[in-house]
Image (cartoon, grey):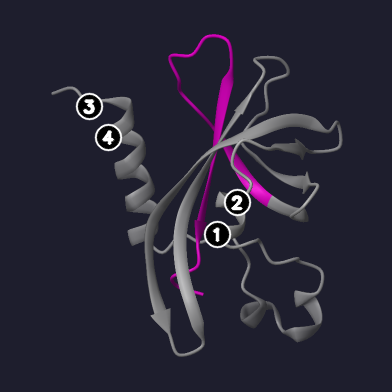
Amino acid sequence: MTTSRRNFLRNGAIGALAAGVSLGVSKQSLGASAGSDFPELPDMAAFQAQLKTDFLIGRSKVPIRLVNVLKLGSRRMLDGKREAFTLTFRADPKPSLKQETYTIEHARLGSFSMLLVPIVSRDKEARYYEAVINRLHA
């Protein structure tokens, strides 16, 4: 049985969501004093507003472009909206970024940290990276 790349990525992201994997660090679990050391990631709407804009990754300031924001799920809670989504970035083939948590800078969204994972693509002229944001279990 063969699986397309699209189905593999979608099922993997949904599986991570179902398992409760969260890439962000909850301020509640760290305590109020440590929460200020970890800036909160922007929400899905903020990222959608920055589609097709460049972000700078890591110390070497590698430019990557946000090319897709995909909603995985959301629900409203008494303490605010909870959401889960993926971000897909496109970058030049060189230099290649490995799977790692990077400091990311953006002119409008500011600076924050996220885990970026290289993903497979048929586009030989670029590399693609994905980040999964899960705030459903925060």
Q: Which residue is mark 4?
A: 7
Q: Residue furthest right?
A: 59
Q: Amino acid at mark 3?
A: Thr
Quarter assignment of residue 94? top right
Indicate the secondary structure of the residue bearing disc 3: loop
- Relative to 70, say whether 7 is above or below: above
Q: Which residue is mark 2?
A: 49
Q: Which residue is mark 3?
A: 3
First in sequence: mark 1 vs mark 3 = 3
| Mark 2–mark 1 CB contact (< 8 Å) | yes
CA gap, disc 1 and disc 3? 31 Å
Label 1 Cα crowd, 10 Å radius (few <14 / some 14-19 / many 20+)? few
Is residue 121 rendered magenta in the image?
yes
Q: Amino acid at mark 1?
A: Ala
In the image, which residues are magenta?
A: 114-138
First in sequence: mark 2 vs mark 4 = 4
- Indicate left or right for 43 with 3 as reference: right
Indicate the secondary structure of the residue bearing disc 4: helix
CA gap, disc 4 and disc 3? 6 Å
CA gap, disc 4 and disc 1? 25 Å
Q: Which of the two discs, 3 and 2, sits closer to the camera?
A: 2
Q: Amino acid at mark 4?
A: Asn
Q: Which of the two discs, 2 and 4, sits closer to the camera?
A: 2
| Mark 4–mark 3 CB contact (< 8 Å) | yes
Q: Which residue is mark 1?
A: 45
- Indicate left or right for 55 with 44 as reference: right
